Image (spheres, rainbow, N blue to C red):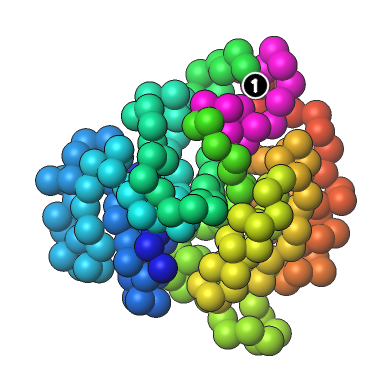
Amino acid sequence: MKIGIIGAGNIGGNLTRRLTALGHDVSVANSRGPETLTELAEETGATPVRAEDAARGAEIVVVTVPLKAVPDLPSGLFDGAAEGLAVIDTGNYYPRRRDGRIDGIEDEGVTESRWTERQLGHPVIKAFNGTYAQDILDRHRPAGDPGRQALPVAGDDEAAKRKVRALIDELGFDTVDAGGIDDSWRQQPDTPVYGLRAGAEAVAKALTEASPERKPEFQG
């Protein structure tokens, strides 16, 4: 499968490593330009590209950049993508640690992924936002393994969600349907499921225990 990854930090870098190891055709971009991705490309066989070219021909694109950087992504980001493109949003809102206050989230009370979706102009599937990056490399397990971790996946586009859940299964993790994007607050930072290393039953339970109220440290 042709997959684009925008953002080559911890999550983006390790997804590049695993997906290329599984035989996918991966294009990877960052904010500093493809010339800065030579080492990752040599390690993995991924193709370093500019952000505006990462989605060309892609069936899945992973957007894994700081939330404050999302509005600065190139316009027409998904022009040239394959029909039925699924966009994965791994982002989290850290107003005090990193992103500053984002009015669209604070004033309108929308989930961070709904806000991201509006900036991108394309529906998103929220996944990997509470996953430890190293777990992508170290904690994958075959289907049916009793120690297999599960990841929550939220989104409104059911076809895109199925495509993303199938990819996560291939990566070696179970998934739990966390509802639509307006329900994705259940997996935002500081919720019970965030960072949870557990199976599907425990992940589903943690999603039900989440509170929609953001604690002060997660408010701008």
137, above or below 15, in the image: below
Name the spot of residue 200 as percent of width and height, x first. 76, 69
108, above or below 176, in the image: above
Name the spot of residue 13 as percent of width and height, x first. 34, 56
Mark 1 closeness class: few <14, some 14–19, many ≥20 residues within 10 Å:
some
Residue at (71%, 45%) from the top-left corner?
156
Left or right relative to 160: residue 203: right
Out of 193 and 155, give the one closest to the viewer: 155
Residue at (87%, 51%) from the top-left corner?
208
Residue 47 makes an appearance in the image? yes
Q: Magenta stretch?
A: 105-119
Out of 8 and 189, give the one closest to the viewer: 8
Name the spot of residue 171 as percent of width and height, x first. 51, 72
Q: Which residue is mark 1?
A: 105
Residue at (54%, 53%) from the top-left corner?
84
Q: Quadrant of the C terminus?
A: top right
Name the spot of residue 87 as percent of width and height, x first. 52, 48
Q: Could you tell me how many numbered marks the image carries?
A: 1
Residue 14 makes an appearance in the image? no
Q: Quadrant of the N terminus?
A: bottom left
Decide whether the magenta segment is chiefly helix, strand or loop.
helix
Left or right relative to 203: residue 45: left
Residue 117 on the magenta segment? yes
Residue at (66%, 71%) from the top-left corner?
174
Out of 12 and 75, give the one closest to the viewer: 75
Q: Under tag 1, what secondary structure?
A: helix
Left or right relative to 137: residue 110: right
Identify the amino acid type marked 1.
Ile
148, above or below 162, in the image: below
Residue 183 position by quadrant: top right
